[in-house]
Amino acid sequence: MRYRFLQISNYIDHNRDQSKAIAICGGTVIGSELVPAKIATAKSNLADAGLSGYVEIREGDARVTLSNLGGPVDFALIDGWPVSQEPSLAREIIQVVAPQIRVGGYVLNDNAEPDFLEFIRDSANGFISVNLALKSGTELCVKVS
């Protein structure tokens, strides 16, 4: 089985150890980044670590670039972007990727934005979740239908 991970955070290659662990498991990391300089740095760092073949960085707005992930995703990390106005980017991202997460797949959201929680805790969207007492709020979700 080849695992597929989605990483949406404020810097795609910030955790090369995570990418190495995924590569060892035979997995792929998919990410999206707006800033060309960050993409160039990430690609260079990943190449230096020998991980280029395991990471796909899509350039552009994640709400667009992640609309077709090419198959089911096993784990999605949605981090960053706490804002005072809604919708939060976390909410917009989960709406795009939720249909692409396999049943039994996980979502981890750092910051626990209220509108993200509203979506993920609505049983009609097919998830169950629990708040983890980490930082200012971290939500662990599993897709059940």
Image (tube, rainbow, N blue to C red):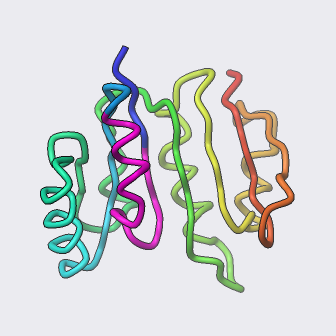
Q: Quadrant of the C terminus?
A: top right
The residue located at (52%, 44%) in the rendering is: 76
Query: Which residue is outermost to the top?
Result: 1
Q: Position of residue 10 (x, y in %)?
A: 45, 73
Q: Position of residue 86 (x, y in %)?
A: 68, 76
Q: In this view of the protein, which residue sits in the foreground, 118 or 42?
A: 42
The residue located at (19%, 78%) in the rendering is: 36
Q: Which residues are magenta?
A: 6-23
Q: In this view of the protein, which residue sits in the foreground, 48 or 111?
A: 48
The residue located at (29%, 32%) in the rendering is: 70
Q: Position of residue 108 (x, y in %)?
A: 64, 49
- Residue 40 in magenta stretch: no
The answer to which image quadrant residue 118 occupies is: bottom right
Q: Is residue 122 left or right of residue 106?
A: right
Q: In this view of the protein, which residue sits in the foreground, 54 or 128?
A: 54
Q: Position of residue 28 (x, y in %)?
A: 31, 36
Q: Is residue 20 above or below residue 109?
A: above
